[in-house]
Image: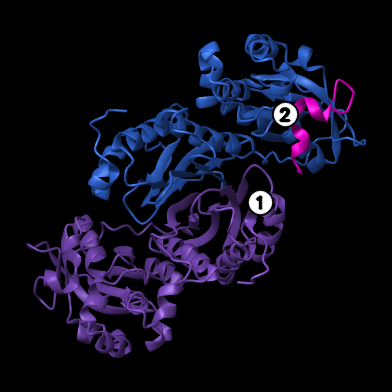
Chain colours: A blue, B purple
């Protein structure tokens, strides 16, 4: 952050917009770009996927833990992952922004740069938004996607006998957060980066839908909690394999930081959120799409919505018992 | 507001959602309703209109001036007016909400009721959203619309010789705000209601597009300021007739309050915002659609983007000179 950056309150709205727009991709599906009362985006499928997530400073991010670009990338990515989790291809974002007057303009430019970084490679346009002053930074993103003729993949379609599969990292973001909270980010910069700027496999969502996924969701609150949501919506039990086996690559990656902090790796694997992996179920005979690894099987609904290595997860060790849903 | 309402912080997120959802219409075009990672909304035209506006407590509304339902209606209406101003029919909203923990749950229910009031008669669904805690109330609405096969009406298409026309109230909201600011709301409850809960002619947007509108925008910042935007985007001058004549009905309605506060009616007519009327231009031989009244003609671009009664508007009297755009 350049010390000489002017504060937002010293600029007109137009000055600030002129600094923001160069960072934002228009997107090839954008038919009427920002500048009118509303944008117009192609929806060739005849249906549009819509989702919205809000980030608030002090609740979802801290400016001393994340750069502006981190916050922008994260705001975009967590919304794009929700679009992907329906089996859709993301097409466009709009961004509502509340910015305190003493915010450096460079911070807002950095946020825009992060949004652009996340969106440009996926050909997602940032097609509109609104800027307001206010006492706290708020980034409210609404993301849109196109189903390209496919059936939307909901949470409700998992059937006994299906394979449970996961695309993307598991536990990395939670580990990165724990390193920051412990004041030891230097222990593993890669995990801290995974927290600051998650990299979900957005394109895996459409692949999963094409590959016959019967149910899917974005893992934002941890494998157990989101697994329970999928299981309950589908009326089944997810029987996850031993984490050390089915998530062996993640275990290997997390082991050093877990040992250094005296944390059980399973806590991060099962309860760590915000990696925005895609948890999906596929028919037993399906070939898993690129990016997905098998992590369990779907059973008839038993007493527990999620089993880990054949047993109910131990509440104390994974922290999930705080959550009502 | 019931004194016995629990505070938001005393409820789980699910408890709060259970109080909100009954107030929100699903909308007949909603194919996948809230509850999954994203909603799916019909976009039969193959294009979707998208716009976003943020309301922040203390900046855009005060809880002692507006009820929760007023804020909800206003948040919906100003977004629906933006969709209408493209010539589209609104289809769906999503709402990002930041709520301090000490907010009464009844306030949030009231907000939802206001959103529902605005959306239900137009068959607009509230299809998703996100709830967060935070230090200030923020209502971030993204609205969507369908063009039903029509060309989007932009700000750029006004041509010399076109008629300038306005649908909806002019100056009422500004007058209502002035009455509240002067501590004299009892002078004219109707004008105060027009500020608290504007009633734009949302359906006039699609009628204008069908009726051949060459340019259109939503009047959110006053007739002069928004007129200048349309004029500049189209490279023309808007020559508005004498306000006392072309806006005679509004003058009659505003006269009493203006006289009581010692304000010139023209200030409210020309600089008052937030009525969310639709300012549009039509070919000279067009029959104006229902709801529109002629207020001027389009000229070749002269030295001023907007003339009032043939002259540049007097800066001092209307306040528009504060604004750079």
Kindly identify which numbered label has been placed on residue B34: 1
As drawn, is A41 to the left or to the right of B274? right
Instruction: Report whether residue A197 is seen.
Output: no
As drawn, is B188 to the left or to the right of A53? left
The range drawn in magenta is A308-325
Q: Is residue B121 above or below residue A233?
A: below
Q: Position of residue B25 (x, y in %)?
A: 64, 64
Q: Position of residue A187 (x, y in %)?
A: 55, 11
As drawn, is A229 to the left or to the right of B241? right
Chain to which mark 1 belongs: B
Chain to which mark 2 belongs: A
10 Å crowding of disc 2: few (<14), some (14-19), many (20+)? many
Q: Secondary structure at mark 1?
A: loop
Residue drawn where x is 77% and y is 23% of the image? A286
Quadrant assignment, res B166: bottom left
As drawn, is A181 to the left or to the right of A318? left
Kindly identify which numbered label has been placed on residue A223: 2
Q: Secondary structure at mark 2?
A: helix
Q: Position of residue B142 (x, y in %)?
A: 49, 53
Question: Does the segment drawn in magenta span residue B252?
Answer: no
Quadrant assignment, res B61: bottom left
């Amino acid at each position: 952050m350049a010390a000489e950056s002017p504060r937002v309150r010293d600029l007109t709205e137009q000055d600030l917009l002129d600094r923001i727009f160069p960072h934002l991709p228009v997107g090839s599906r954008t038919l009427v770009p920002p500048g009118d009362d509303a944008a117009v985006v192609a929806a060739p499928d005849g249906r549009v996927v819509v989702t919205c997530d809000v980030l608030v400073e002090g609740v979802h991010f801290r400016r001393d833990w994340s750069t502006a670009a981190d916050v922008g990338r994260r705001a975009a990515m967590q919304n794009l992952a929700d679009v992907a989790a329906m089996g859709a291809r993301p097409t466009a974002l709009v961004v509502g922004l509340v910015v305190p007057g003493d915010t450096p303009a460079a911070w807002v430019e950095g946020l825009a740069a992060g949004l652009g970084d996340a969106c440009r490679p996926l050909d997602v346009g940032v097609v509109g938004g609104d800027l307001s002053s206010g006492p706290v930074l708020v980034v409210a993103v609404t993301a849109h996607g196109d189903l390209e003729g496919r059936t939307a993949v909901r949470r409700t379609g998992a059937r006994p006998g299906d394979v449970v599969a996961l695309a993307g990292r598991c536990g990395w973001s939670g580990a990165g957060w724990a390193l920051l909270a412990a004041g030891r980010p230097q222990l593993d910069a890669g995990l801290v980066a995974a927290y600051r700027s998650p990299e979900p496999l957005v394109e895996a969502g459409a692949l999963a839908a094409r590959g016959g996924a019967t149910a899917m969701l974005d893992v934002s609150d941890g494998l157990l909690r989101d697994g329970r949501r999928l299981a309950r919506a589908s009326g089944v039990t997810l029987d996850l394999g031993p984490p050390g086996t089915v998530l062996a690559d993640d275990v290997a990656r997390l082991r050093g930081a877990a040992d250094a902090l005296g944390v059980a790796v399973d806590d991060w694997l099962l309860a760590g959120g915000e990696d925005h992996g895609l948890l999906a179920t596929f028919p037993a005979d399906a070939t898993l799409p690129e990016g997905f690894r098998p992590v369990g099987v779907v059973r008839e609904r038993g007493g527990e919505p999620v089993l880990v290595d054949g047993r109910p997860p131990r509440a104390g060790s994974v922290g999930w018992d705080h959550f009502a849903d």
